[in-house]
Amino acid sequence: MKDYEETTVFLGQWGRFQQIIFFLLCASTVPNGFGALSIVFLADIPSHHCMIPEVNLTQEWLNAIIPVKVVNGKQELSRCSRYRLDVVRNFSALGYIPGRDINLTDLEEEGCVNGWSYSRDVYQSTIVSEFDLVCSEQWKQPLTSTLYFLGVLVGSFTSGQLSDRYGRKPVFFFTMAVQTIFTIVQIFSPSWTVFSILLFLSGLGQIANYIAAFVLGTETLTGNVRIMFASLGVCMGFAIGYMMLPLFAYFLRSWKSLLLAISLPGLLYIPLWWFLPESPRWLLSQGRIEEAEAIVRNAAKKNKVEAPQVIFELYSADEKKMLSKNEKHHNVLDLIRTSNIRSTTLILCLLWFTLSTGYYGLSLNATQLGTNPYISCFISAAIEVPSYISSWLILQYFPRRLSSSCTMLLGGVSLYFIQLVPTTLTELSVALEMLGKFGFATSTAMIFAYTGELYPTVLRNTATGTCSSFSRVGSCTAPFLLQLRVYSRYLPYIILGTLAVVSAFCTLFLPESFGQPLPETIQQMHKKKRINCPCITRKDTPKPVVLLESQL
């Protein structure tokens, strides 16, 4: 069977057809940048303290009724307690002055029985102030992010198999509709439970359409354009959406207004149905030769080139029958069926887990880097632009295996160094954290392209979805990983750095795909060469050695 890229070489790489696919699919990832990290602002915790009901208290007691606590070496008002209101009211009525007549440390404290008063200096409202996710209910705040990423995990796992079975295009538009609809419905949530369920469903669609768009573009585009799309195009679309998020959040400081603003752009993508075709590679893998040929002929017409009379001439009737019989029903078990594919899959799952944990851990921590969460979030988003440009240049000119290992090592070592910085040099700590974010973001962009190049057409979307599922396990743990700073400020950085270093080493045992065409079949994937571990010696077996054509 002739290679797809060789068969369609007459189309060129950058005609009108490819330009439409490239820019529309890149634009489709902008809402993903909105949605993926909107939880940074939706669930941020504003300053708060116990609400004081309207009672007859002197100004001195109104100022003193909230105890002062020392947090991280700084004095601040208690967030979860106040002095007993009935006792304070009696002292106020008797004319006692706090601190002079009454020793405040001797007063009994009580919880915020009348609710909380939230500062509106930064936000008008968040889901934390809406549903009182503080004090005894504070555990729900990181759980909200985890539930969103659990939806993303389920979407990653199921969308890959659905896309391999029903096509890239239908799954892409269906999951985009799911993301848009459930994001809008969240605005009307009467409780945290309902909001979390809708957030889970929104996350389910959020990653699924991103993966479908990535695979559709990877399979339709060829050559250097495919590399640009996989490493720079979709990632830059995501980064643009991410950078616009703090801008929207700055002007729309109510969580409901922000949700509405980030969901409405999804409606603009409905007309794309008539402009985006199905993946010709996927159609060929399903034995639907005529449909694939019709798409390629339409592409030739748009590019103003002449197509041959028979494009896929080597697909005989027997091959069509074989494709429809054997290649149509691949599933996730094929990713671990043979030792060669299994080792590739396990290493990639570890890499995706590490990169997602690091990327989302550092992104969710962005609002804690400075006094202004909007500027901090924008800096965290802007650092992704040079990282994606770097990933594109690296994928253009350097081998995948070594470059992926080096960028992960950069991210891990940068986080290790943070604990060596004096507390007075906060700017240096932020710079090292952003350098770590640069390494993780660069590796993430590269691993998407690398994974797509390693797997054949019949498994590509399933493999990408499965690996993405493992990455979402990492993103689910990221919110709680950040909570470990209660025990040690540097513990999250040490864990992320260790994961990155271990993953960087494991990357060296993946097959190399640089400069090679995308595999169409599982047999072609088996031909990929990998580095053998020097510590492992294999015993000779009586099995005959079959030399590949490239070895003759």
Image (tube, grey):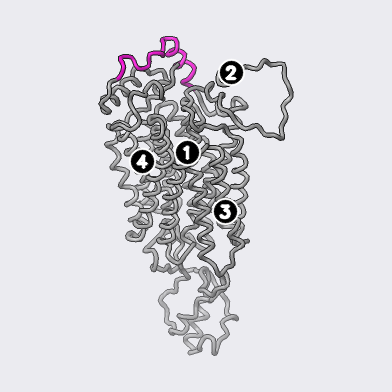
Q: Badge 2, how many Cα within 10 Å: few under 14, some, many 20+? A: few
The answer for how far apart the CA atoms under marks 2 and 3 are is 52 Å
Q: Is residue 366 left or right of residue 274?
A: right
532 or 487, nearer to the observer: 532
Which is more N-terminal, label 3 or label 2?
Answer: 3
> Is residue 320 found inside the magenta-colored segment of the image?
yes
Q: Would you name the residue on which mark 1 appears?
A: 397
Q: Badge 3, how many Cα within 10 Å: few under 14, some, many 20+? A: some
Question: Could you tell me residue 488's position as x and y percent?
Answer: 62, 61
> Is residue 140 found inside the magenta-colored segment of the image?
no
Q: Would you name the residue on which mark 3 appears?
A: 481
Q: Would you name the residue on which mark 2 appears?
A: 552
Q: Would you name the residue on which mark 4 appears?
A: 26
Residue 59 appearing in the image: yes
- Which element carries disc 1, helix, strand or loop? helix
Q: Nearer the viewer, mark 4 or mark 1?
A: 1
Instruction: From this view, report whether residue 44 is shown above or below residue 202.
Output: below
The answer for how far apart the CA atoms under marks 1 and 2 are is 27 Å
Residue 34 appearing in the image: no
Q: Are marks 1 and 2 in contact (CB under 8 Å)?
A: no
Which is more N-terminal, label 2 or label 4?
Answer: 4
The answer for how far apart the CA atoms under marks 4 and 2 are is 42 Å
